[in-house]
Amino acid sequence: MDIKYKAKPFKTLEEAQEFKKKHGGVLYKDVPRSRTKKDHLLAAQMFGFNAEKYHFSVNWNEVID
């Protein structure tokens, strides 16, 4: 069994929250005064998505059998 760290970007908070309900993980926000802004920008850099276009991301560990 392997565990793979993944991140998925979203344009709206509602989309991100719906995905998080189904898959779990941590919601990161790129919004003013957000405590998770640095984590969101790091995820964007690691996974190659545009942080200026996608202001939310859900990061989780996927278990692969």
Image (cartoon, helix red, strand yellow):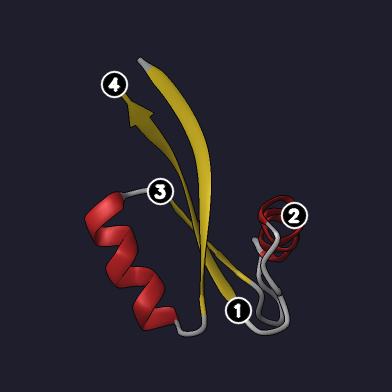
Q: Which residue is mark 4?
A: 65
Q: Which residue is mark 3?
A: 25
Q: Judge whether 19 appears above or below 14 on screen.
A: above
Q: Nearer the viewer, residue 24 or 45?
A: 45
Q: Mark 4 or mark 2, which is nearer to you?
A: 4
Residue 28 found in image quarter? bottom right
**Residue 25, image x and y in percent?**
40, 48
Total tally of numbered discs in the picture: 4
Q: Mark 1 or mark 3, which is nearer to you?
A: 1
Residue 36 found in image quarter? bottom right
Answer left or right for 14 relative to 35.
Answer: left
Q: Which residue is found at the position 61% from the left and 78% from the top?
A: 55
Secondary structure of residue under mark 2: helix
Secondary structure of residue under mark 3: loop
Given contact means CB atoms under 8 Å apart, are the residues at marks 4 and 2 in contact?
no
Q: How far separated are the C-alphas under marks 4 and 2?
A: 27 Å
Q: Which residue is mark 2?
A: 42
Q: How far separated are the C-alphas under marks 1 and 2?
A: 13 Å
Given contact means CB atoms under 8 Å apart, are the residues at marks 1 and 3 in contact?
no
Q: Which residue is mark 1?
A: 54
Q: Amino acid at mark 4?
A: Asp
**Residue 5, image x and y in percent?**
53, 37
